[in-house]
Amino acid sequence: MRRYTITIVFSFSFFGCSQWVMASETALVKKCQAIQTEIDRLSDLKRKGGDARQMNRLHKKRNGLKKRYGDHDCKRVRHLLN
């Protein structure tokens, strides 16, 4: 009886922990997806062209987002991104 009790307790604690990990992964995927979408949008705007000031501004914004993408370790979940 005691053995089953310990097994049940460990099962519930593992299940609760795995839900937390899945929730944090989901949040990370959403955050990374938003960053990647914005990077793609800025890349499209750069391709359309503009004056030097606009290009510099877009380039700085895109590089800042790429840094955030790396800081959040989005490469780890990039296979889940659209």
Image (cartoon, helix red, strand yellow):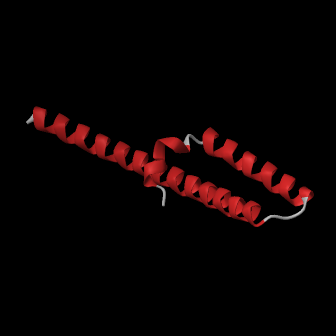
47 above or below 64?
below
* Residue 67: x %, y % from top left: 69, 42
Instruction: Decide if residue 42 is on the left or right side of residue 11.
Output: right
Image point (91%, 57%), residue name: 53
Query: Which of 28/49 is in front?
Result: 49
- Residue 46 against residue 6 in the figure, above or below: below
> Residue 4: x and y, percent?
12, 38
Q: Nearer the viewer, residue 7 or 67?
A: 67
Q: Who's the residue at 48% across and 56% down the image?
A: 81
State the image quarter where residue 2 is shown: top left
Residue 68 percent location from the top left of the image: 67, 44
In the shown orientation, is residue 75 left or right of residue 52?
Answer: left
Q: Residue at x 76, y 67 (%)?
A: 48
Q: How many numbered discs, if any?
A: 0
As drawn, is 43 to the left or to the right of 79? right
* For residue 12, above or below residue 54: above
Is residue 14 or residue 4 the one in the foreground? 14
Q: What residue is rendered at 61% in x and 61% in y?
A: 37
What is the x, y in percent for residue 26? 47, 54
Image quarter hosting the N terminus: top left
**Residue toward you, 16 or 29:** 29
